Amino acid sequence: MEPQPMKKRTIIEKIWRDHVVAEREGAPALFYVDLHLVHEVTSPQAFDGLRKRGLKVRRPDLTVATTDHSTPTTPRGLPIVDKTAAAQIDRLEQNCRDFGIPCYGLSSERQGIVHVIGPELGLTQPGMTVVCGDSHTSTHGAFGALAFGIGTSQVEHVLATQCLLQQPSKTFAVRVDGALKPGVTAKDIILALIAKIGIGGGTGCVIEYCGSAIRALSMEERMTVCNMSIEGGARGGLIAPDATTYQYVAGRPFSPKGADWDAAVARWRELPTDEGATYDREVSIDANALEPMITFGTNPGMGIPISAAVPDPASIADPLERETLHKALQYMDLPAGKPLAGHPVNVVFIGSCTNSRISDLRAAADILKGRKVNPHVRVMVVPGSQHVRAQAQAEGLDRIFREAGADWREAGCSMCIAMNGDQLQPGEYSVSTSNRNFEGRQGKGGRTFLASPLTAAATAVTGVITDVRTLL
Amino acid sequence: MKFDSAYVVNQTEREIAPKRFESHFVILPIDNIDTDQIIPARFLKTISKNGLGDQLFYDWRYDASGAPKTDFILNRPEAVRAQVLVAGDNFGCGSSREHAPWALTQFGFRAVVSTSFADIFRQNSLKNGLLPIVVPPDIHAALLASPGAIVRIDLAAQTLTLEDGRSVEFPIDPFAKHCLLEGVDELGYILQQESAIASYEARRAGSINTLA
């Protein structure tokens, strides 16, 4: 009998198959987790569950915790004003002590947003499965890892067993070919994709980003793209590893060393999608045609090129869709049919797991250098980690921000989720480099325009939504 | 489908989902209702699972002074007895917070009906006895057009029946259905597979990158 040709597989299917522990009829697969990241908000109830059952953490050596969501970005020496936040942070540190999990807490120089520290410490590596009780875990997909957010029940499952019950996802190829024009960034690629497929367009899928424009991105830019996969409804999004990936991972505190490194790279080279493998769905984007993107509404799919007009609900046939857009524009208090450029803002936020890495801060500093923040705008720059903060200070970026009139903060999620006191006041507008513009996301009654660090910095200078290409 | 009875552990801890129930429903005719609306992030500083029902849809439900908005559906008398929420497409998008289904169930909901659900919300709901029920657009439109009506939901048969007698079958993951009907605890089920996990770890010992 002729040997059957090997089935061509995508990187998504390869990583999935490598992590199936057991399969039983009538039940989802038992799926192994290589790295479990933990933070203060979605874990306390899971640790309570372990205590109730008298269970231990199965693999504390595959588990890392940090504080980020409810963490103040004021100077670290100051007491935490919000008692519930303080109690939550204390509880994480106590849980980590009790269960033997390394915790990079407030006093650690490794503290930071969970999706920033994983990669910078070399914890995130190609071919891994990474989970966290946070939907932006998709960020780690930039390394060619299968990474997704889970709920607190599943956090408990992983703590106890290092496993999850999972169904395989559908595969979705997003091809981005061409070259980005000056002023157009990785953030604009992902905002354009979400505008194209819609906020639920990737439901049930893991995305593989491919094409020449993706290959040309740095690791930090790839993280920005993968980070917002969830905003297109996909649980995960990944990019096959290549020389850019290996160069980034090499030499970090937890990356393999010596012979282990060589063995790891040999394994990683097997990961990319086989020539001729097929996906359940494919979409293409022309990078040459992209402009800086900005959102106008109350979900991340409501995005437009900066020169385009806000859509008119009257032009939409489906009644529920029309009502949804109408409600969004009402909340944002924006007229339909006009571009956003020139619209005044109160706050500019540069930070979040989407755009708080050193290259994001450098991009913003390039615009702000030698310029002043508009006096009507409050500008917050929040580095993603203490490591990013230290590097920015070593490069003098903090001085550029301060001299321009921006507020230079400690590391954390900050105004992306507004749990820590950093927030918009009702009715205020922000341009934010974060990932969600839902109603009240940055503070009750606050109104968010999502954009790149370049657009945010340009807006900080002028005080109104600005096409950064006019300042380059 | 057969499951070893040994997997059925810790039943006292878990509420077994009702096999069938009838209820009034409330309507939120908005697409893409995200978890920040279901429960705003500032309420996630709790270290408990309880007390979240009062915070459900907080910013839609209460005005700046904290008084209930009388025009919001959950503040109307009919919402008190409703166990079913009918909402627009892609319900539960956004964050992975399990506080969303905790808040919905603590308010009294046992099912949300939509044309689609976000993945993580759907999974979180099934782990908390909240049924995410997907119906076709015509049935969805009929529900939206009949406020004050009653639906019957039968989990075992996977059917949703309207007052006018129309009935649709809804999809549900068979394992989740089994867990809900029989009170199977998922963590207990995984713990039973310890030997499979141990041998998997042994097989991959060289390629699992530990912190050590």
Image (cartoon, coloured by chain):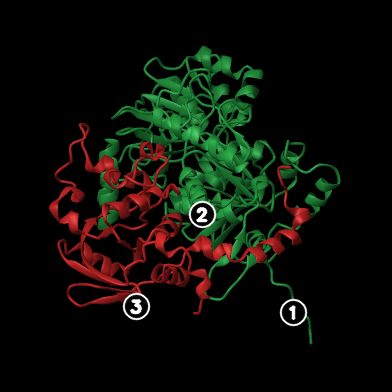
Chain colours: A green, B red
- Residue located at (54% from left, 55% from top): A157
Residue B150 visible somewhere in the drawing:
yes
**Which mark's residue is nearer the viewer, 3 or 2?**
2
In contact (CB < 8 Å): disc 3 and disc 2: no
- Residue located at (73% from left, 36% from top): A253
To which chain does the residue with label 3 belong?
B
The residue at which mark 1 appears reads as: A4
For the residues labelled 3 and 2, the Cα–Cα distance comes to 33 Å
The residue at which mark 2 appears reads as: A53
Q: Quadrant of residue B54?
A: top left
The spot of residue A319 in percent (x, y) is 25, 57
The spot of residue B131 in percent (x, y) is 35, 63
Helix or strand or loop: what does disc 3 sit on? Answer: loop
Helix or strand or loop: what does disc 1 sit on? Answer: loop
Looking at this rendering, what residue extends furthest in the top direction? A403
Residue A174 visible somewhere in the drawing:
no
Q: Is residue A159 above or below residue A291?
A: below
Q: Amino acid at mark 3?
A: Ala
Q: How many marks?
A: 3
Neighbor class of circle 3 (other Cα within 10 Å; few <14, some 14-19, many 20+) is: few
- Same chain under badges 1 and 3? The reply is no
Neighbor class of circle 2 (other Cα within 10 Å; few <14, some 14-19, many 20+) is: few
Residue A53 shown left or right of residue B52 in the figure: right
Q: Amino acid at mark 1?
A: Gln
The spot of residue A204 in percent (x, y) is 49, 61
To which chain does the residue with label 1 belong?
A
Q: Is residue A449 above or below residue A135?
A: above
In contact (CB < 8 Å): disc 1 and disc 3: no
* Observer-nearest of A307 and A60: A60
For the residues labelled 1 and 2, the Cα–Cα distance comes to 48 Å
The residue at which mark 3 appears reads as: B157
